[in-house]
Image (cartoon, grey):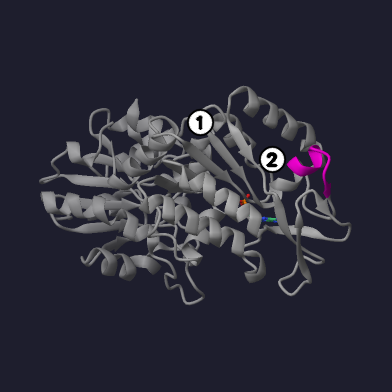
Amino acid sequence: MKTINDFNFEDKKALIRVDFNVPLNDEFQVTDDTRIQSAKPTIIKILEDGGSCVLMSHLGRPKGVDEKFSLQHIVDKVSEVIGVQVKFVNDCVGASVEEAVAGLQNGEILLLENLRFHGEEKAGDVAFAEQLSKLGDVYVNDAFGTAHRAHASTAVIAQFFPENKCFGSLLAKEIESIDKVLNNSEKPVTAILGGAKVSSKIGVIENIIEKVDHIIVGGGMTFTFVKALGGSIGNSLVEEDKLQLALDILKIAKEKNTEIHLPVDAVIADNFANDANTQTVNTNEIPDGWMGLDVGPETSKKFAEVLANSKTILWNGPLGVFEMENFAKGTIELGNAIDAATKNGAFSLVGGGDSVAAVKQFGFADKVSYVSTGGGAMLESLEGKTLPGIDAILN
Ligand code: AMP
């Protein structure tokens, strides 16, 4: 696996695909600079080598050129985070851009305009990728968030750098972390799968079921399992067409010696609202008119015991409706248990959509070993899929 550490960037222009798809407020200010911070080590290494950086990214989902999605809005924030005044050019291909790149000195950074102002980016257009490829000597992919897309700047472009292509340090770290959990893990390995639905996690379950020792199930998908096993789930979230699938998963797990841990108790509510009436009951004895919105204290205790004995932990998806304070406790308790296991030497990886939001909201980001920056890309990696952005660098 070639990374930026295999190159000396002295006098070289690095063309870096970053993921600067950051949230902006109404005044176009960056409200969370995590993605910019994440790209910093790669940029700094290249500048310190004596090279220059040409940064390319998308922002949002513009249909053609749209000022609202201009990367001009983030120039000041990128400059502040990196500590270098960043230059900007108001397109990403063409003569004016090539001129700006030609004038770039060692130690300088040039940010290109939103790649998605050109429809060719998402279409994976080869001619567009070739135009982009003129803007650097070495192609560096450091955008895990878009690594599952076969877009011009994330995958197609790599063919124009047969020798001079590599992973940035963020993307390399993402790949290593997933590998550490799925392929080179220290046992016992525990995967926690929460979130809303079985259907969105089925690919992950199928891929990891043989690789892990324990699967902790939480969140809305619990009730499809509980109902399949004959329990009463009241008005809880359920996928009626996945009941047989839930039974099949339990059967395969048994055959593979993988223990599936289902919540034993649930915090139930008479309404999907923070101020609903609540009570705690056994997960399989939920009365009609009530729905399970969080795991109960017995479950938290049980899950903490499994985690205390785990050496590798993967967490994807919250255990309850954590956005509402009264149903966040199970997710917070789980975070505490992962924190304790990590302090005890376990490797813990959190990734994929809402668990990252939960981890940040409750202050666990610094307490786990690694928080992935990719939602869809992380899920597809866990499903065992080859990501085009990664494949294009490797092959
Ligand atoms: P996902 O994107 O699949 O990880 O799902 C995350 C969402 O699942 C969050 O918005 C949670 O509020 C939701 N969720 C978690 N537990 C439950 C539950 N018991 N009932 C309904 N939704 C839930």
What amino acid does circle 1 point to? Lys
**Residue located farthest toward the bottom when viewing the structure as drawn:** 27
Q: In the image, 98: left or right of 194?
A: left
Front position among marks 2 and 1: 2
Say which mark, if any, is on residue 199.
2
**Residue located farthest toward the top when viewing the structure as drawn:** 255
Q: From what the image shows, is residue 131 above or below residue 184?
A: below
Kind of element beneath mark 2: loop
User: The magenta stretch spans which residues?
Assistant: 225-232
Q: Is residue 132 visible?
A: no
Residue at x 56% of width, y 55% of height = 354
Quadrant of the image where one finds ligand 1: bottom right
- Where is residue 57? Give x, y as percent: 39, 52
Question: 81 or 355: nearer the eye?
Answer: 355
Question: 128 or 105: nearer the eye?
Answer: 105
- Where is residue 203? Give x, y as percent: 60, 34
Q: Dot 2: within a 10 Å radius of its alpha carbon, few (fewer than 14), some, or many (20 or more) residues?
A: some
What amino acid does circle 2 point to? Ser
- Where is residue 323? Give x, y as percent: 62, 66
Q: Is residue 93 visible?
A: yes
Residue at x 62% of width, y 37% of height = 260
Cα distance between the residues tagged 2 and 1: 17 Å
Does residue 230 show up magenta in the picture? yes
Report the residue marked by disc 1. Answer: 385
Residue at x 82% of width, y 41% of height = 240
Q: Dot 1: within a 10 Å radius of its alpha carbon, few (fewer than 14), some, or many (20 or more) residues?
A: some
Q: Answer yes or no: do the residues labelled 2 and 1 have beta carbons within 8 Å?
A: no
